[in-house]
Image (cartoon, rainbow, N blue to C red):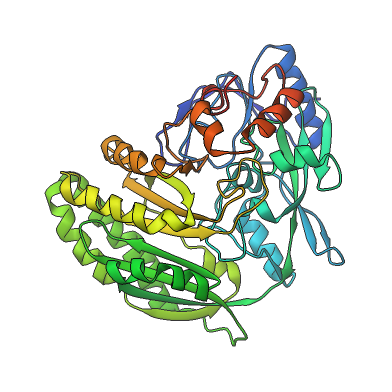
Amino acid sequence: MTDTYARTAHTWRNWAGNVTARPTRVESPASVDELADVVRRASEDGLRVKPAGTGHSFTATAATDGVLIRPDLLTGIRDIDRRAMTVTVEAGTPLKRLNAVLAREGLSLTNMGDIMEQTVAGATSTGTHGTGRDSASVSAQIRALELVTADGTLLHCSADEHPDIFAAARIGLGALGVVTAVTFAVEPVFLLTAREEPMAFDRVTADFDQLVAENEHFEFYWFPHTGNCNTKRNNRSAGPAAPPGRVSGWIEDELLSNGVFQAACLLGRAVPAAIPSLARISSRALSARTYTDIPYKVFTSPRRVRFVEMEYALPREAAVEALREVKAMVQRSPLRISFPVEVRTAPADDIALSTASGRESAYIAVHMYRGTPHQAYFTAVERIMTGYAGRPHWGKIHTRDSGYLAGVYPRFGEFTAVRDRLDPDRLFANDYLRRVLGD
């Protein structure tokens, strides 16, 4: 063991800049053995341990004043098993690198979120998801996990090996150990046809159930202060591939969705009274388009405008009523909201702390431009979401505690029992986990 991968203490910030921490030590182990030694030394020194990836969570999940572990050197593909149709990947590998490697190998994940900057471990540990009628979150595609536990032991778990730990660790919040590798189910690469189309709020909410039923992946964005939405339907296609043109794709994905939108957000932050007019212009700027490409080029898109976010998972049947309440709340309030509200769906899964655990779910996500006061808006939306037994996304801003969460997660006690067994001394604890899991 050497200190060649240790770094001096510094201030750590997440992507949005709303969470900071000053760890005592920052370490980047280059192997699983080195990582296990880092964990054991931290325990001997009485320091808490938290892994931190790219910091795309908006909560303090990864914050610590103890030892911050960066997985920069724990990257790469360990194995592709074409008989089992699985890929095993080091925990620090960014999703964008995994997607590119799989595409070169003629393989793909079945579903994914709309951002691929996160590390594999960070995305799965917080329950990152996309939208899908039948296909669930990134974590639901996990077939096996490897993690270093509090005593430095390397533990392997799957549906057949330590199944109780596997049921919890696929979305483990960093509370059970440090994930070192993940094995995902994969399938032969396929084509998706994306159909993006503006649609009136009243129409999309009236037809929501039909739109979800008729499409493999459906989502929409409502622009506050307007009656306008933008919808996206992704379905498998026999081809041929027809990606967006280089110029038209740049105009839609970079100029309008990032460049012009960034300027509108800056203006809105400086002059809030202008936001409703800007929203009406923005909601009409994106035109209908259809294109066909491999999955990660359809599911994901660049997000260069920084923001803070809160997202709740509701029983799917409650989604439209809850969204209408949000719209009515914004209309009668003095709030000025420059970011669209995102609505997605997911089938029920069997992961203890998944936001879709045991129930078909719809997600309502609200955002505010970074640096804009968000508390009044998020508080009002959260009051609506909790009225429907909403479950907050683990990596996004919320105020819920273990008392509330135990009431909306039937398997909450199952998770905390596994935590008590694997980390009785709370080596992997921090303030956020104390609030959401209890102590």
Specify the quadrant of the image occupied by residue 198: bottom left
83 lies left or right of 123: right
**Which quadrant does the C terminus fall into?**
top right
Work out whether residue 326 or residue 195 is closer to the camera in this orientation and state it.
Answer: 326
Q: In the orientation shown, which residue stands out farthest toward the left?
A: 273
Q: Is residue 107 above or below residue 334?
A: below
Work out whether residue 15 or residue 331 is closer to the camera in this orientation and state it.
Answer: 331
Q: Is residue 29 visible?
A: yes
The picture places residue 111, in percent across and down from the top left corner, at 61, 63
Q: Which residue is depicted at the point 64% across and 62% down?
A: 99
Q: Which residue is depicted at the point 55% across and 52% down?
A: 117
In this rendering, the count of numbered labels is: 0
The picture places residue 437, in percent across and down from the top left corner, at 58, 27
Q: Which residue is depicted at the point 57% across and 52% down?
A: 359
Specify the quadrant of the image occupied by residue 84: bottom right
Q: Is residue 134 above or below residue 417?
A: below
Specify the quadrant of the image occupied by residue 9: top right
Q: Is residue 69 above or below residue 294?
A: above
327 lies left or right of 33: left
The picture places residue 154, in percent across and down from the top left corner, at 83, 33
338 lies left or right of 420: left
The picture places residue 292, in percent across and down from the top left corner, at 53, 80
Q: Is residue 4 visible?
A: no
**Which quadrant does the N terminus fall into?**
top right
